[in-house]
Amino acid sequence: MGDSFELTALDLSFFSHLDCNSTARLNAGMKVKQQPGDFRVQELTEVRPGQTGDFAYYRLDKVGWTTPDAIRVVCGRWDLESRRVSFGGLKDKHAETTQYFTIFRGPVRNLTQQGVAVNYLGQVAEPYGSQHIAANRFAITIRHLTTSAEAVALDGVRQVTESGLPNYFDDQRFGSVGRDHGFVGKEMVFGRFEEALKLALASPYEHDRAAQKREKETLRRHWGDWMACRAELPRGHARYLVEYLAARPNDFRGAVARLRPELGGLYLAAYQSYLWNRILDRWIRGAFPADSLGEVSLRLGEFAVPLQVSPAVMGAWQTLTLPLPSARQKPSPEADWHTITEAVLADEGLTLSTLKVPGLDKPFFSKGERPACIRPVGVRAEAGDDELNLGRRKLLLAFDLPRGCYATMFVKRITATRRPRGS
């Protein structure tokens, strides 16, 4: 689909706090991930390892670890350079997860540590990446339900099965967006490079660790006094950029250009994903009658979902694919999404032709498209008494989703959909 973000070079300290607890915003009292086993995800892949190939292929089972932190454990225990490791996706810390990774000329061995189990499966000819993930299989338990909330959720499952699920990027995609909803990528597009760098290096995030908080406080306190920053910062990427600015004061464009490539790509992907969500939201509001719509509250706003889909609209809804907005996108004025895209970008003060970083060839917005509607496969829903919360009910959900889609959107859709204000 062209919208996935893959990491292969793994200096991973920055990403550890982005693989955050993605618990859905539910109706009051409902609980997801009350215990790690309540949220299980397994990568499904067609990769079949053999006896030959330069890349050792492993299965990683983990709980209580982000994917980057688990990989860092492997590299430390086996004394490996992180650049030899490749994996397909970031899996949640607050879940039981199974995924796969490769190591270039990796060891034929297993590893077991608290919360991490690595099993060698064989050899493959190429590094494992997001393109090798066919789907993700989920098993989710929603707890602390009242009987009325249980009925609403079960009806939501029926609606999604019949009408499909809007394929919004969920809140996990926006871990690089600060508390004030400032997008580093947006500042880059408008050429406000100092503000972009300040957001990237010094903006506080909910899941910052103690060392990151200290580093960011130093940067905020001494911003502009690069020698003072350098004196207090530990060795690392931030100090490298500060040293660049100390030698070339005010060359913030050059400093942004020296952000790690994966970071620059992440910042642009977050802003592009937000714009795509807004395009889909506007398409849905225009395509469906107001009385057939609900809204789901995400971190960055309210987004429309169809509660029911008439046969007249079903074909267009199920087959709709929306391009990821970028200056590299080929305009199609005859497509119904083109006008909507222009309107969403106009709200931001942009056009398709200006959706790029001025003066820099890299990073750039990815080119691709994403289905607007997805249908979870193999959906099963089973209600019962909640053994962890006496007097309440639980709902066990099982389903498969294509890679790049968010199980938490399914949970929010069936538990937290509201009628639009004023309807």
Image (cartoon, rainbow, N blue to C red):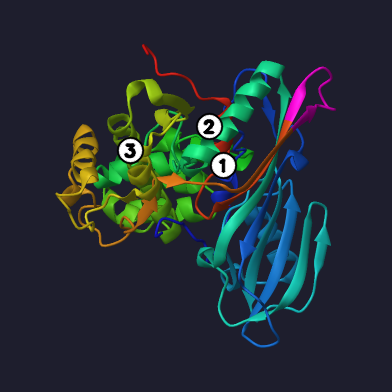
Circle on res. 202 = none
Residue found 52% across the figure and 44% down from its top: 232
| Sequence-wise first label, 2 or 3 | 3
Indicate left or right for 392 with 53 as reference. Answer: right
Residue indicated by mark 3: 312
Front: mark 2 or 1 = 2
Q: Amino acid at mark 3?
A: Ala
Give the quarter of the image for residue 368: bottom left
- In the displayed image of the protein, which residue is found farthest to the front? 311
Position in image of residue 16 (x %, y %): 60, 48
Q: Secondary structure at mark 3?
A: helix
Position in image of residue 392 (x %, y %): 78, 20
Q: With respect to residue 107, does 187 lie above or below?
A: above
Circle on res. 212 = 1
Q: With respect to residue 28, does 47 lie above or below?
A: below
* Numbered marks: total: 3
- Residue 212 vs residue 299, the one in the foreground: 299
Position in image of residue 273 (x %, y %): 38, 45
Estimate the spatial distance between the alpha carbons at disc 2 and disc 1, rounded to whole Å.
34 Å
Can residue 214 be seen? no
Residue count near mark 2 (Cα–Cα under 10 Å), binned few <14, some 14–19, many ≥20: many
Q: Amino acid at mark 1?
A: Gln
Can residue 299 be seen? yes
| Sequence-wise first label, 2 or 1 | 1
Position in image of residue 396 (x %, y %): 72, 37
Circle on res. 413 = 2
Q: Secondary structure at mark 1?
A: helix
- In the displayed image of the protein, which residue is found farthest to the top? 422
* Quarter of the picture holding the N terminus: bottom left
Q: Which residues are magenta?
A: 383-394
